């Protein structure tokens, strides 16, 4: 059962996600049209990594999804056969 706090956190994440989508579409549409999805995902991962220095505590509960711990997301994307560039 979700508490009021969890719903607020989920709503905030959804709003931030939508803000990021809108910002990328508005400011980087031409770039996104020119590069493959895999390159865009790798670029987003690199940007995300620079915004999460190791010495700072993780945002929220320490996981970015219910399944994959925060520290494993970038590694999982980089090692995925779909995003490895090979």
Image (cartoon, helix red, strand yellow):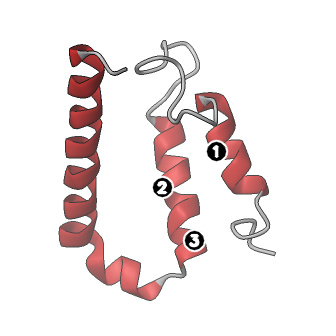
Say whether marks 1 and 3 touch (CB < 8 Å).
no
Hey, which residue is sitting farthest front in the picture? 1
Disc number lying in front (1 or 3): 1
Identify which residue is drawn at 72% across, 48% down: 76
Q: Residues within 10 Å of mark 3 (few under 14, many from 20)?
A: some
Depth check, front residue: 44 or 12: 12
* Mark 2–mark 1 CB contact (< 8 Å): no
Mark 2 Cα within 10 Å, few/some/many (few <14, many 20+)?
few
Whole-Å distance between the Cαs marked 1 and 3? 14 Å
How far from the left and from the top, in percent, is residue 51? 44, 34
Kindly report the distance in space between the C-alpha atoms of the residues bearing marks 2 and 1. Answer: 10 Å
Residue at the disc numbered 3: 39
Q: What residue sits right under mark 1 in the picture?
A: 74
* Crowd band around label 1 with a 10 angstrom C-alpha radius: few (<14), some (14–19), many (20+): some
The image's mark for residue 44 is 2
Say whether disc 2 or disc 1 marks the residue closer to the N-terminus. Answer: 2
* Earlier-in-chain disc, 2 versus 3: 3
66 or 80, which is in the foreground? 66
* Residue at (63% x, 29% y) in the render: 69
Q: How many marks?
A: 3
**66 and 78: which one is in front?**
66
* Residue 58, horizontal then vertical, whole percent: 48, 19
Badges 2 and 3: C-beta atoms under 8 Å apart? Answer: no
- Sequence-wise, the earlier of marks 1 and 3 is 3
Nearer to us in this view, 51 or 67: 67
Q: Secondary structure at mark 2?
A: helix
Q: Is residue 28 above or below residue 47?
A: below
Q: Is residue 2 above or below residue 11?
A: above
């Amino acid at each position: 059962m979700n508490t009021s706090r969890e719903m607020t956190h989920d709503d905030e994440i959804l709003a931030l996600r939508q803000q990021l989508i809108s910002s990328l579409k508005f400011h980087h549409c031409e770039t996104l049209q020119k590069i493959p999805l895999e390159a865009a995902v790798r670029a987003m991962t690199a940007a995300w990594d620079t915004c999460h220095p190791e010495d700072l505590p993780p945002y929220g509960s320490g996981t970015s999804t219910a399944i994959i711990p925060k520290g494993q997301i970038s590694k999982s994307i980089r090692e995925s056969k779909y995003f490895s560039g090979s």
